[in-house]
Amino acid sequence: PPQYFGDAPLASVSMDFITQWFTDGDTTGRVVLTVVLVGALFVVRWLVLRAVHARLEHGTATFRTKKWVGYAVTVIGILGLVRIWFGGSGGVTTYLGILSAGVAIALASVLENLAGWAFIVSRRPFRVGDRVEVQGRAGDVVDIRAFRFSMLEIGNWVAADQSTGRLIHVPNGKVFSEQVTNYTEGFPYIWDEIGVMVTFESDWKKAERLVGEALSAHAPDTSEPAIVNSIREAGQQYLIRYRHLTPTTYVKAQDSGVTISGRYLVGVRSRRSVSDALWRAILEAFATEPDVDLAYPTTRTVLPGGVVIRSIREESPE
């Protein structure tokens, strides 16, 4: 049976209310102001971006400017719409109080991502261009948005921290619940090691000298102004105190031979090229030394008392 509101059907009352709401002069004015505001913001954004593209070359500066213009237009648009539809500060307060009660529960993950975005923008745990690792996945940050940031993946099936070509999208809320490792913040260099194993019969002292010569020839020069300045700046921002930056070697006896580890400082994105140059130099140097041989996993059997070898012919009857 139809539902009634007083003497009139409920559907009729609802239609009359909607019609009156749309034909109300105040509501019509707000709709017009909303359309004007949105259109004006789009025009302003287009004009600003056009001026930016005319003055700046396409690159990091243009990308960041475009992002900040988008943020500014979004914030101004939200504030303008709230002002148009809810009036002064009292209306805004009432609206936010009613809205927050339901949104806090229904959109918990969305709010967490927004809070993560605010943290990333304000505290700067990483920026566009930094190399970071989150949840065991590493990459170069190429974009930061309100709900997630994107990384150009490195590693995985590709060796030595080189790019795979895939994009990884990570929710911003992960900065609160997961460990974020930054390769480049403060000090854009990392320590790397190269391990060379020689046999026990080899002259390991000569092998260590050859590895040290390769490190001196191909590892980055730690006396360069760029490295020195980076260390100084890192020490001012964080409690980082590197005293010995020159390449060094360490020796360790293992099951299959003697391992000589070369430790050196290298740029974050130069790890593979430097490692390639070191291995080429070490292999060429070892090839000219008859008393230095590379080792590999081997098994040795020692029999007490020696081994007696008899010929089958000697045991066969004549």
Image (tube, helix red, strand yellow):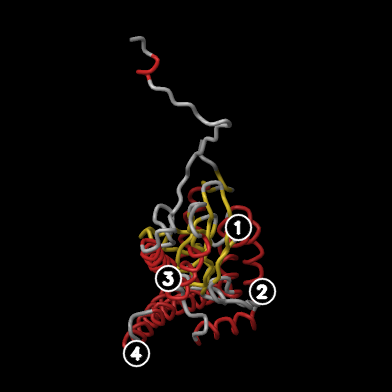
Asked whether 88 or 244 is in front, the reply is 244
Q: Is residue 23 above or below residue 316?
A: below
Q: Secondary structure at mark 2?
A: helix
Q: Is residue 75 above or below residue 224?
A: above
Q: Which mark is residue 178?
A: 1
Q: List the single residue furthest toward the top.
A: 317
Count of numbered circles on the image: 4
Asked whether 264 or 311 is in front, the reply is 311
Where's residue 148, x and y in %?
49, 62
Q: Nearer the N terminus, badge 3 or badge 1?
A: 1
Asked whether 152 or 25 is in front, the reply is 152
Q: Secondary structure at mark 3?
A: loop
Where's residue 70, x and y in %?
44, 75
Q: Nearer the viewer, mark 2 or mark 1?
A: 1
Q: Residue at x 36, y 61 (%)?
A: 287
Q: Residue at x 57, y 50 (%)?
A: 254
Q: Which residue is mark 3?
A: 270
